[in-house]
């Protein structure tokens, strides 16, 4: 389930591109805190502090006690914006939450086990999605959704409705949405078709005259 962490922030930062560049040059990240009817507050957080706060097993889904100039807010990261080339965090959206109210979070999907029947047939297990959106209370958000692929065969499709989630956690989406599928290589598909294609030729050979008979 989601873990918690403390994170300090400062309000009153100057807005605008030039001010944001100066913050980042000082190893701080411009951010905004909003939610629950509050007026959005422009804040900044130290890059290292944010990295440490989100380094636990819940990652970006960590529940934060966000201290803004001495006032604490329960919050989560709504969005991490990244530099298009460097990929480091350039801006953060924090959302204030009520720990007793349900929220919607994207939870990463991880596969466990080995689908030996798929591998022996020349196939490959393919996760169709990286995350699944769930609705639950903040403290009940899973850190990850584990899907066991041990019993998969080349014809298997694991759908959203097949996944078991903890009590109180509801997956959002159509139950028949494919979550894990199987990809078959062209060689394996051709080998399956080969016997069927060879059968007519064999039948034709029985009636065709030989070269000497001709």
Image: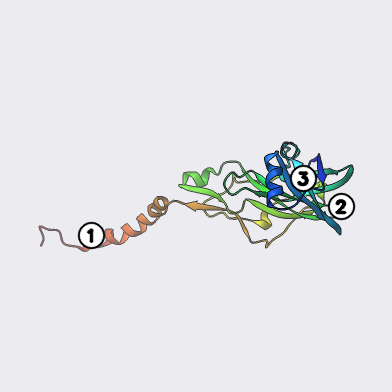
Which residue is at 23% across, 60% downward?
A: 206
Rounded to the nearest angstrom, the CA distance separating label 1 from label 3 is 80 Å
- Of the numbered discs 3 and 2, the one sitting upstream in the chain is 3
Total number of numbered labels? 3
Seen at 69% across and 44% down, the residue is: 22
Q: Secondary structure at mark 3?
A: strand
Q: Residue 214 — which label? A: none
Residue 168 seen anywhere in this rendered image of the structure:
no
Residue at 16% over, 62% down: 209
In the displayed structure, 24 sits above or below 35; it is: above
Q: Which residue is mark 1?
A: 205
Mark yes or no: residue 191 visible: yes
Residue furthest to the right in view is 71
- Cα separation, mark 1 vs mark 2, equals 77 Å
Which residue occupies 82% across, 43% down? 10
Q: Position of residue 190 (x, y in %)?
A: 38, 54
Relative depth, front residue between 155 and 179:
179
The residue tagged 2 is 98
Q: Nearer the viewer, mark 1 or mark 2?
A: 2
Compute the Cα span from label 3 to label 2: 22 Å
């Amino acid at each position: 389930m989601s873990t918690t962490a403390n994170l300090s922030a400062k309000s009153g930062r100057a807005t605008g591109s030039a001010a944001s560049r100066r913050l980042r040059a000082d190893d701080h990240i411009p951010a905004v805190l909003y939610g629950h009817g509050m007026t959005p507050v422009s804040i900044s957080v130290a890059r290292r502090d944010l990295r440490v706060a989100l380094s636990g097993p819940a990652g970006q889904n960590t529940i934060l006690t966000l201290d803004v100039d001495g006032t604490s807010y329960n919050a989560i990261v709504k969005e991490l914006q990244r530099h298009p080339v460097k990929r480091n965090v350039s801006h953060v959206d924090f959302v204030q939450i009520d720990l007793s109210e349900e929220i919607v979070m994207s939870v990463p999907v991880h596969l466990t086990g080995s689908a030996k029947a798929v591998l022996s047939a020349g196939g490959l297990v393919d996760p169709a999605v990286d995350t699944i959106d769930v609705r639950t209370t903040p403290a009940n958000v899973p850190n990850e959704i584990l899907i066991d692929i041990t019993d998969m065969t080349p014809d298997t499709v694991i759908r959203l409705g097949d996944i078991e989630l903890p009590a109180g956690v509801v997956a959002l989406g159509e139950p028949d949405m494919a979550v894990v599928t199987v990809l078959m290589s062209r060689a394996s598909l051709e080998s399956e078709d080969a016997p069927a294609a060879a059968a007519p030729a064999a039948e034709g050979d029985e009636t065709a005259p030989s070269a000497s008979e001709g």
